[in-house]
Amino acid sequence: MVKKLLIVIEIILSIVLLKLFANFLINEKFINDYEKGKYDLKIIGVLSFPNLSQSYIYHYNRGNALYQTEKYEEAIDEYYKALNSRMSEKEECSVRINLALAKLKTLDDLENEDNKEKNIAILKSARNVLTEKGCANDKDDNGHSKEAEQLKKDIDDMLKKLENEKNEEDPKEQEEQQEQQEKQENEKNETEKRKRAKEELKQIQEESTKERNEQLENSENWSSSYEYYGGKRW
């Protein structure tokens, strides 16, 4: 019985060792190809099975390959999947930095005014990725990763520039806005004038009606107190 148990334990240990060795070989293969500019996503798919206990490695590597092939939206999805796995603080910061970089790659033409709101939202999202778990500190430079801190600083500079440009309105646009405000104010004043005139007219009508009623009432009182003379009687 003990002998069988030892055999089972030996088999399990052998499988674990083979798995770890397979992880090492496959990841080394990927890294070597990656450094040579080879990003074959089919090969990366082989990484998914032996890395079940460390699924972030598969998603992280796949995200990197997608990033290099300029498939940034897909890379972002893979980095988020990687963050759902358990990993060390250092490894998580590496994933978060690449995720933030992938988000920055989705920025549209920064000179185009129509893209300003969208670009500001992307920059803030990328910044949140870095500060969410402390890889970069939200208020100072004491995050876990110097790279994350530097990237956060670069993002802050871009945000400051875009938000300042947003607040600096074109003089012509300011003039148009002022004219529009004056027009709205004039329309409001005209409406108020018409309202007051209508109320005044109504008051005049009510007073006139009241006056006529009083005159009529006085006339009736006078006629009722007057003794009618029907002419000379013989």
Image (cartoon, rainbow, N blue to C red):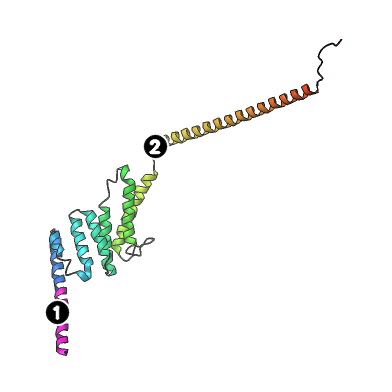
Where's residue 231, x and y in %? Answer: 82, 12
**Quadrant housing residue 199:** top right
Does the magenta run of residues contain 158? no
Q: Are marks 1 and 2 in contact (CB under 8 Å)?
A: no
The residue shown at (33%, 50%) is 120
Residue in the foreground of this view, choosing between 182 and 174: 182
Left or right of 234 on screen, residue 41: left
- Residue annotated with mark 2: 173
Residue at screen point 54% across, 33% down:
192
Q: Which residues are magenta?
A: 2-20
Q: Let me know if residue 6 is in the magenta part.
A: yes
Residue shown at 15% from the left, 61% from the top: 34
Instruction: State left or right for residue 119 relative to residue 7.
Output: right
Tag 1: residue type? Ser
Q: Left or right of 83: which side holds 224?
A: right
User: What amino acid does circle 2 point to?
Assistant: Glu
Foreground of the two, 27 or 218:
218
Sequence-first tag of 1 and 2 = 1
- In the image, residue 142 sits, relative to residue 177, either above or below, namely below
Query: Where residue 1 sits in the image (x, y, percent)?
Result: 16, 89
Give the residue number, with chain letter if any, for mark 1: 14
Seen in the picture, residue 51 relative to 126 is either above or below; the reply is: below
Q: Residue furthest right?
A: 234
Viewer can see residue 145:
yes
